[in-house]
Amino acid sequence: MAPKKEFSGKIVAENRRARFDYYIEDTVEAGLMLTGTEVKALREGRATIKESYAAPEKDGIWLINANIPEYSAGNRENHEPKRPRKLLLHAKEIARLAQAVERKGYTLAPLKIYFNARGIAKLELGLALGKKAPDKRDTEKERDWQRQKGRLLRERG
């Protein structure tokens, strides 16, 4: 596994619910195949990936149900907001992710869409395993305890 890269971009959309619903085993940075008006709408900061997921197809991995609203200054050539978008990954990464989804029961959960330091739209994709209800309760308890611990430490100075 490669070392973590330093992040220095603008986050457009984030799926915070994914870390609550899933155990994120691994993350992958993928490019997005977008049209011009989609990039302009992303630069306006308008996108949601809350209910989206990625699925392997015969010709690659596709981002499904991600909503990038139409560009406000677009004309009749504007894009369809919820169209499937192809993810740009290396062939070895596609094979590894597709195998994990098919054989091991993993899910490909989009975590965030952002612009990297070069201004290129990227998607952080997580290889995720679903949590059961008791696991979600444990996560919530841990988060509440961390919040309470922070308050106590601030009060003590």
Image: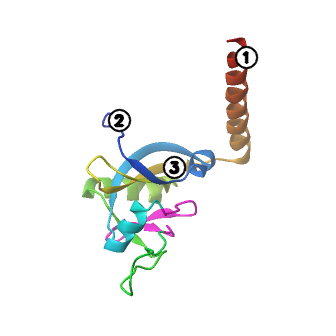
Where disc 3 sits, the SS reads strand
Label 3 near label 2: C-beta < 8 Å?
Answer: no
- The correct choice, above or below, for 139 with respect to 85 in the image is above
Residue in the picture at 35% in, 35% down:
4
The span from disc 1 to disc 3 (Cα, nearest Å) is 37 Å
- Counting residues from the start of the chain, the first of labels 2 and 3 encountered is 2
What residue does disc 1 label?
A: 155
Q: Nearer the viewer, residue 82 or 11?
A: 11
What residue does disc 3 label?
A: 128
- Residue type beneath disc 1: Glu
Residue in the picture at 50% in, 69% down:
67
Q: Residues within 10 Å of mark 3 (few under 14, many from 20)?
A: many
Residue at the extreme front: 73
Residue 68 placement (x, y as % from top left) = 47, 69
- Residue type beneath disc 2: Lys
Residue in the picture at 62% in, 46% down:
20
Residue at the extreme top: 156
The span from disc 1 to disc 2 (Cα, nearest Å) is 34 Å
Question: Is residue 101 shown left or right of residue 8?
Answer: right
Q: Nearer the viewer, residue 21 or 123?
A: 123
Q: Magenta stretch?
A: 46-67
Residue 100 placement (x, y as % from top left) = 43, 53
Where disc 1 sits, the SS reads helix
Instruction: Quadrant for the N terminus, please.
Output: top left
Q: Nearer the viewer, residue 83 or 59?
A: 83
Residue in the picture at 73% in, 16% down:
155
Q: Give the number of the disc on residue 4.
A: 2
Mark in the foreground, 1 or 3: 1
Instruction: Quadrant for the C terminus, please.
Output: top right
Mark in the foreground, 2 or 3: 2
- Residue type beneath disc 3: Ala
The span from disc 2 to disc 3 (Cα, nearest Å) is 18 Å
